[in-house]
Amino acid sequence: MPELKSLLSDLPSVDEILRSAYGLDWLEKYPRKIVVKAVREVINSHRTAIISGIEPDISTESLIDKIGVELKKLSAFSLRKVINATGVVIHTNLGRSILSESIMQHVQEIACGYSNLEYDIEKGARGKRYSHIQNLITEITGAESSLIVNNNAAAVLICLNTLAKGKDVIVSRGELVEIGGSFRIPDVMISSGAILKEVGTTNKTHIKDYAQAINENTALLLKVHQSNFRIIGFTKSLTLQELVSLGKRFQIPVMFDLGSGCLIDLKPYNISIEPSVQEIIKTGVDIVTFSGDKLLGGPQGGIIAGKKKWIDQISHNPLMRALRIDKMTLSAFEATLRCYFDEESAKNQIPTLQMLLQDIGIIKKRAQKTLLKIKKIKNFSIHDHCEIMIIEDNSQSGGGALPEIEFPTFAVALKPYKKSVNSIEKKLRQCNPPIIARIGDERLIFDMRTVRDNEIELLLKGLIEALQGDD
Ligand SMILES: *Cc1c(COP(=O)(O)O)cnc(C)c1O
């Protein structure tokens, strides 16, 4: 082994690199802190490699290349745009609902300037943050009153804490759900200070199970939407209507954690299992909570809608301040909710609804257009790399909504000749912007439901990179 000492002393110092032509160039382009960090990290990794007996290539070019890569990494945003080719419209890991440009224009105006967030312009006095959307929510849903907090988990928490702290909340064993990312009904119950009273069994809960559990310490009957799973076969659960009747009989409020919450009627699309929020309010339920960024298609938030009596109590809970939403979210909500005055405009202007309900012919055209463009790329023959075709497939809504419903879709599918599907999938994730695709049947599948028209060029660029690059 060459003498460790001489190898180590061959490594340039941070200072030497900073004073080199490359160093000076970087210092002009990037903040000094970042340049120093990148240089130091690359030198350190080389030093570690030398000491551990692996002799790294310490030619100047290799060091410079590595520092260049490191600098790009350090100066890039961590949270950034990706292309969603999974077909899952409300993809929690990819940011759930996306907002339209027109909605963002309003958000930008509010965020980049002062606003009447908590100011009553007519009176010239202090105003209320939630006044901007409270009426919108009640008009659209038919509820008496409403509130909005950080997310649906927060909505459930503050409702339980207000109405049932130290008291019993009755829930069916079939509804003690876990929604990804650690939202579990029994855990939220503990955090809220309410006492969980489970009734029934996993598959069957009868009205008498609830009735027998009710006593003077019962504060609330809670129904939870099963969201991301279904129990099928020998089952029985109460309809919301039955639970509401029971609540009325015993004079105990009934709350429904709806999870996703759809503000339009999906029946014309043959999606009949998910009642709209309007239909749920009509049952006479006391409180319903749902997310802003699932089927509603807005920003992250948790909407609480229901009887004024309870909403007023909740609004005075000190937790309200801890869970409140900011002006950007509020402006995005107002702009999104305004689209719902006209159901057609909601379907066109809210990307989540637009992608879920878009005509299959449009998806097919997008897939065909993409395939044609791939075949026409200059100096690149796709057929040298893979078999490529358009396939019929199914996409999912995601976000814990409509789990058993498959949305027929069209996808571009490719089967590489030389490389593995997994290596291409990985390469696509390393693109800028990263492309997130699906693997199925040993093919790479780009579901064109969730790829936006203005992303097709980026998709092509990424695809060429991934297919041509080294493994
Ligand atoms: C999604 C969901 C939640 C959590 O909502 P967030 O907005 O993610 O906080 C709670 N309950 C149900 C039934 C859900 O589907």
Image (spheres, helix red, strand yellow):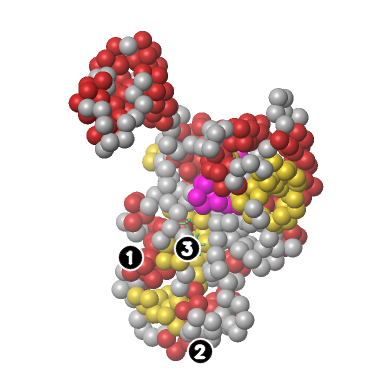
For residue 93: magenta?
yes
**Residue placed farthest to the left in the image?**
5
Residue 146 pos. (x, y %): 49, 57
The quarter of the picture where the N terminus appears is top left
Indicate the secondary structure of the residue bearing disc 1: helix
Give the labeled residue for mark 2: 208
Residue 15 pos. (x, y %): 25, 16
Quadrant housing residue 60: top left
The front one of 196 and 420 is: 420
Indicate the secondary structure of the residue bearing disc 3: strand
Indicate the secondary structure of the residue bearing disc 2: helix
At x 73% / y 43%, what residue is drawn?
Answer: 388
Residue 278 pos. (x, y %): 62, 62
Label count reads 3
- Sequence-wise, the earlier of marks 2 and 1 is 1
Give the labeled residue for mark 1: 191
For residue 316: magenta?
no
User: Which one is closest to the eye, mark 2 or mark 3?
Assistant: 3
Give the labeled residue for mark 3: 179
At x 48% / y 44%, what residue is drawn?
Answer: 330
User: Which one is closest to the eye, mark 3 or mark 1?
Assistant: 3
Given the image, on which type of amino acid does mark 1 rest? Ser
Ligand 1 within 8 angstroms of badge 3 C-beta: yes
Query: Which range of residues does the magenta coloring cover?
Result: 87-100
Examine the rendering and report whether any part of residue 356 can be seen: yes
